[in-house]
Image: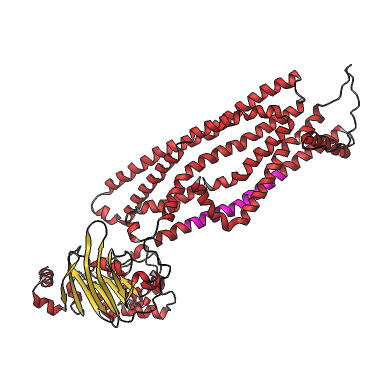
Amino acid sequence: MNHFLNILKYAKPYKRYAVGHIISNIFFALFGTLSFVALKPMLDVIFKKDVDPCGEDVALITPVKPVYEGLKDIGDYAEGYLEFLMYQFTGGDNSKALVFVVCLIIIMFLLKNISGYLANYFLVFLRNGVIRDLRNKVYKKTIELPLSYLSEQRKGDILSRVTSDVLDLQYSFLSVLELIVREPLTIIFTITAMLIISVELTLFVFVFIPVMGWIISMIGKSLKRKSDRVQKEQGTFLSTLEETLTGLRIIKGFNAEEKFNEKFQESTSRFYHFSNKLLNRQNLASPTSEFLGICMIAIILWYGGSLVLSGDTKLDGSTFLVYMGLSYNILTPAKAISRALYNIKKGGAAAERIQEIIDTPNPLKDKDNASIKHSFDSEIEFKNISFKYEDDYVLKDFSLTIPKGKTVALVGQSGSGKSTIANLITRFYDVNKGEILIDGVNIQDLTTKSLRAQLGIVTQDAILFNDSIKNNLQLGNETATDEDIIEALKVANAWEFVKDLKNGIDTNIGDSGNKISGGQKQRLSIARAIVKSPPIMLLDEATSALDTESERLVQIALENMMKNRTSIVIAHRLSTIQNADEIVVLNKGEIVEQGKHNELIEKNGVYKKLVDMQSFE
C-alpha cells in the first residue's frame, strides 16, 4: 500500500481532473442506487391494489404530501413523497403512473451513465498524466545515475522497468483510481437504502461480507511475489534481445544463433509458466467474488422471503423485490473492489521496481553550494589520486599536472589505468582518495554540467545516434549554424565524404551510424567535439580501431583539433603521440616513466619496449 501512495503523489499536478472524477463518481453511485429505488413505485403500480375483506376492489386512497418527521422515518417519507408527486402528475391514472415511473427510471439511468462517462473522461487525463510523468521521472533518473550503477544492471531490465512496469501500473494501480470513490460510494449508498428498507435484513447480510473479504484476501496473498517473478523474467529476455541486436554480427560470425535462441526460449518459457500461474490466480478473483455474492443473494432470498411469507416484517412484496435488486447491486462494486485488491498486490511489484530506480541515491550529485565553471585558465592537476572499481585499485597515488595548451599522452598496457583517468576527470566516477583540480578547484566542488562543458570527448567507439549528421554534431552546441558544422567537418577531414551524400549534413546515418564506415564515424565524432569547441580535449584511443588509411585521415583531424587546446590523449598506437608535449607511461596504475618521445627512447625503459613491440608488429 505504501507503493500505491507513492504513485498517487504523481497525481498532484492533475488535481482538477481528480476533483472532477470524484464528483462525477459521487453522482454515478447516487443515481445508480436511485435507479433501483425507483423500481418500487412501478412495482406498486403493477401489483398493488387495495382489496376489502370480501374480495371486492375499493378505491385507492388519494395520497397526501407527507410531513418530514426525522431521519428515522426518511424511508417512509421518501416513498410517500414520491407517491404524492406521481399522483400530482397522473391524477391517479395507473397507465399514466406507469409511464411516469418508466420515465423516472430512464432518467435515473441516463444521469448515472452521463456521470460514469464524465468520471472516465476526467480519469483519462489523470491516469495518462501520471504515467507520462512517472515514465519521464524514471528516464531522467536513469540518465542522472552514474555509470557504475548502469554497469551493474541489465539493460533489458531497465528497459522493462521504463516500459512494461510503468504500463503494468497503468492497468493495475492507476485503474484502482476509478474504484476508490465509485465502488465504495455505490456500496455505501446501496447499503444505506437497504438499511432504510429493513435494518434487520441488512444486519443479517453484514455477517457474510467479512467472510467474502477473508476468502478473497487468502486467494490474493501470493500475487505480489508471483508478479515480481514475471517482471524480473521479462527483464531477462529483454536483456537477451538487446544483446542480440547489439552483437548480431558476432553471433552470426561465430554461428552462435542456436545458442542465443536457446537462451531466449528458456527465458520466455519461464516467463510463460510464471505468467500462467499469476494470471490463473488473478482470474480467480471475479468468479470467486461472484459465486460468494450469489450465495449471499440466495441466503437473503431464503431469509427475507421467509420473513415476508410469515408476516413477521413490514416488508411487502414490491419492497422486498427492490431490496433484492439493491443486494445484487452490491455485487458489481464488490467484484470491482476485489479485482482492485488483486491489482494493488500485482502492481506492488512493478511499483517497487520503479521506485527502486527513483530512490537510488546518486553519489555524484552536485553539492548544494557547487560553483559554476565558465572557463579553463591555467592547469589540470591530479593530486595523489587512488581509485578502484571494485576491490583492487586501478590507480595508486597518481599525480600529474597538465598546463593549459599542452598535449599529454597516457600510454601503457591494457588495464594500466589510462581510460580510468578519462572517466575520473569527466566525473563519471569519483576518486576514492586524493583530488582532481582544475584551476586549483576540486572538480567535486563544481557543477557537473559546467565541468563537462569544458571537456570534449572522442572515444574509441564512435557513438553516434540514429539522426542526421547535423543533429549529431549539434549535440554539445545546439546553437551551431550550418556554417559552423561544415567548418568543423572540414577540420575533421569529414567534409570530403559528407558533401557527396544526397542530403549533405541532413543525411540520416542510421542506427549507431551504421550507414557509414568506421573511419567516417570516427571523423564525425571528432567534428562533434570541434563543434562543441571546449578548451580541454579527451581522446580515448580514438584511432585504435581504424585501418591505416582511416587512421591517417583521423590523425590529421585530431592534430587540427588539438591546436591551441589542452589535450589528454590515451593512446594505443604509439606512432600517433610522438609529438605530444609529454608522454606518461603507466603500469598497474602507477607512473613508471614520464617525458618527451625522444627522452623516453633514450632511457631504454618500458616506453622503448612498447615502441619496439609495435614496430615489430
The prevailing secondary structure element of the residues shown in magenta is: helix
Quadrant in which the C terminus appears: bottom left
- Dividing the picture into quarters, in which one does residue 250 lie? bottom left
Numbered circles on residues, count: 0
Q: Which residues are magenta?
A: 111-135
* Image height of 299 relative to 218, above or below: above
Question: Splitting the image into 4 quarters, where does residue 568 fall?
Answer: bottom left
**As drawn, which residue projects farthest toward the bottom?**
564
Q: Is residue 120 highlighted in magenta?
A: yes
Judge from the rendering whether residue 502 lies leftward or rightward of residue 5; answer left or right.
left
Residue drawn at the location 62% of the way across and 34% of the way down: 331
Residue 135 position in % (x across, y down): 47, 56
From where the camera sits, is residue 88 visible?
Answer: yes
- x, y percent for residue 294: 61, 28
- Residue at screen point 74% across, 35% down: 37
Q: Is residue 270 above or below residue 532?
A: above
Q: How is the image coloured?
A: secondary structure
Give the percent coordinates (x, y) of residue 140. Answer: 44, 61
In which quarter of the view is residue 319 placed? Answer: top right
Q: Nearer the viewer, residue 90 or 368?
A: 368
Q: Position of residue 545 (x, y in %)?
A: 23, 66
**Which of 354 and 486 lies nearest the eye of the viewer?**
354
Q: Is residue 462 left or right of residue 413?
A: right
Question: Is 89 situated above or below 312?
Answer: below
Name of the residue lying farthest toward the top = 54
Is residue 607 placed above or below 275 in the rendered structure? below
Residue 319 in magenta stretch: no
Is any part of residue 496 visible from this angle? no
